[in-house]
Amino acid sequence: MRKLLFTIVLLFPYFVLLHSQSTHSLTLEESIEIAKSKSFTMLNLAENLKIAEFNMKSATSRLKTHIDMTISSPQFTETIESWKDTTGITFYYPIKELGYASTLTINQPLPTDGNIFIQNSLSSGENLENNFRSSRLRSRIGFNQPLSSFYAYNSIRSSLKRAELDYERSSKQFKREELNLVYQVSSSYYNLLSLQKSSEIALLDLERQMEASEISQNKYAAGLIREVDALQMEVDLAEAQNNHDIALLNETSAKNSFKELLGLNLNDSIALNSEFKYEIVLIDPEKAVELALKNRLEVREQEIQIELQKLSIKQQKADGMIQGRIDAYFEKAGINQQSGVGLLNSLKNSYNNLIDRNANYGVGLTVTIPILDWGENRALVRASESRLKQYSYRKEEVKREIETEVKNLIASINSNLKRLQVLEKNVLVAEKSFEITLKRFSDGDIDSQSLALERNRLNNAYTSHLRAYINYQLSLADLTRKTFYDFRTNQEIQ
């Protein structure tokens, strides 16, 4: 019984570890979906997109009605005042006041950069020394409008336009980084698949070498080969074992890196689909270039820079123009000042006074005329216009770079496909050749050195085919990243 309990206690941590592990049998598509949902890179980019979305929402909210209330209740102040009589003697006395105030402002921005507002306020102050109270009520409707927004620069519309462009840029950046992640996952996936296949190749090589070594030992025992040939076979077997151990170590290291990229627990176990299937994809170069120019952020980013620079030029020109502003208001106010009156009665008297008193109103035009700035504003405008030309030149340069990049990539894809098809046949030939060579070695027609050369040829054929397959798949993934279009499924990436 004690031995059983001891065994359970000893193995308990291993049971917990096994229970916490998960096994993932992954295809490339499944790996990409896991990375999109768990990768810290995508999580950060998603937050950047939310920031741009909230900024755009803030810009659109500027055109909506805003209501604010300010309350100062109560406010106590104590000061020392002085008074000089006719004899020149100065008397000092304290003044203690208790005040209450509140202001409600309703402001409606206008698309013309102006605004209409309604402001209601009440305030009351009481002198605690002589019980004297002063109350005031005020209600004002006002309007102000900068005239330059009609012919020069409208800050509200420009801010909204900037926010929309920033949001569009962030959306495209998110999609571009998502495609970059897809390519990064694809590259890591195929790298791990390559190492996984290399481990299989190393294992097959080890098994073949063990078989050849066994044949060699039997032939040496029978006196059919020299001792040096038997020893060489032992060296080759040790080398094959070492190559297999190294392949397994590289595969384990790549699996950890792959799990980290996908956001999986490092204790989890993963296995990749090792079927080396591929599709022959026909690509129209003109269509690929057209899609790249339409979808690539680099082009749209230059267009956005051009639009933003035009807004900056417009704003800079407005600074050197005649500025005008119209202000108008209509106001009713009521005041009450007397001693021995409570707060509510004082406010009531102020209201009655507001009803009886004539209204206040005003309207005014303010004009600012720039007379002399020694060409400062004009120089800034010219500098902004030159920067606009730079953005236009850069846009055309980016278009040429993208066209060249896509055409070269398509040529590389076609080359990789042809090489892959040739190496498939090469693998079949190498496998048949090795079977024949192994048979000849078993029959004593050739020595161990010839067998080793044929084995190396077969391993090189496997490795070359594997590399060609991976290069073809990665070049297709790279084309999807650079055109926002999947030519394997003929679907545009939204």
Image: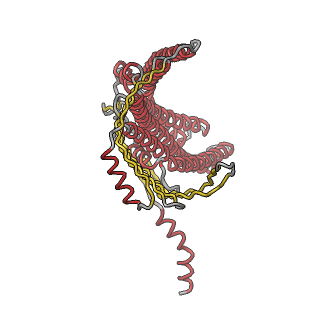
Q: Is residue 227 left or right of residue 183?
A: right
Instruction: Give 488 or 100, whichever is nearer the viewer.
Output: 100
Residue lying farthest to the front in this orientation: 87
Find residue 105 and report its image quarter: top left
**Residue 133 rendering spot, x and y as whole percentages:** 46, 56
**Residue 36 rendering spot, x and y as whole percentages:** 42, 45
Residue appearing at x 40%, y 40% in the figure: 58
Q: Is residue 323 above or below residue 65?
A: above
Q: Is residue 468 left or right of residue 110?
A: right
Instruction: Give 35 or 173, whichever is nearer the viewer.
Output: 173
Find residue 94 and report its image quarter: bottom right
The quarter of the picture where the C terminus appears is top left
Is residue 462 visible to the viewer in this orientation of the structure? Answer: yes
Residue appearing at x 49%, y 20% in the figure: 319
**Residue 93 rendering spot, x and y as whole percentages:** 62, 57
Is residue 398 visible to the viewer in this orientation of the structure? Answer: no
Residue lying farthest to the bottom in this orientation: 1
Q: Is residue 466 left or right of residue 347?
A: right
Q: Is residue 70 above or below residue 437?
A: below
Instruction: Give 87 or 176, whichever is nearer the viewer.
Output: 87
**Residue 298 rendering spot, x and y as whole percentages:** 45, 25
